[in-house]
Amino acid sequence: MTKTTLPKRYTYGTPDTECRYPVLLPNGEFIGHVFRWHRAWIAVPVGSPIEIRVSAGAIGKNAAAE
């Protein structure tokens, strides 16, 4: 059986001074950022002032980016 590697749907940029990771599409388009707050990962999509708690700390930033 051959294992197929799928292309990444997103990447993370360098975190800013407040430890927010920008989430980028493969073409470089910025789609929002994720950050950790009190052991939970929070996502903020572009154009939205609302922060969304999307995962527990154990799951990580990958779940928050999706």
Image (cartoon, rainbow, N blue to C red):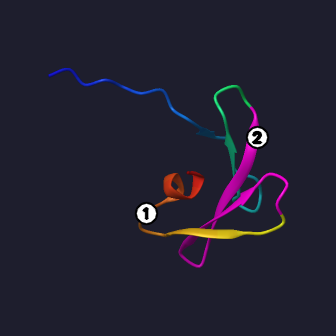
Judge by depth and name the residue closer to the eye, 1 or 58: 1
Q: Residue furthest left?
A: 1
Element type where label 2 sits in the image? strand
Residue 35 is situated, as x and y percent measured from the top left of the image, at 65, 62
- Element class at badge 1: loop
Residue drawn at x 74%, y 50% as measured from the top left: 32
Crowding near the residue tagged with mark 1, few <14, some 14–19, many ≥20 C-alpha atoms within 10 Å: few
Position of the N terminus, as image quadrant, is: top left
Mark 2 to mark 1 CA distance (whole Å): 23 Å
The residue singled out by tag 2 in the image is: 30
Magenta span of residues: 29-48
Depth order, front residue of 48/32: 48
Which callout, 2 or 1, points at the residue further toward the start of the chain? 2
Q: Is residue 30 left or right of residue 38?
A: right
Q: Which mark is residue 59?
A: 1
Q: Position of residue 7 (x, y in %)?
A: 48, 26
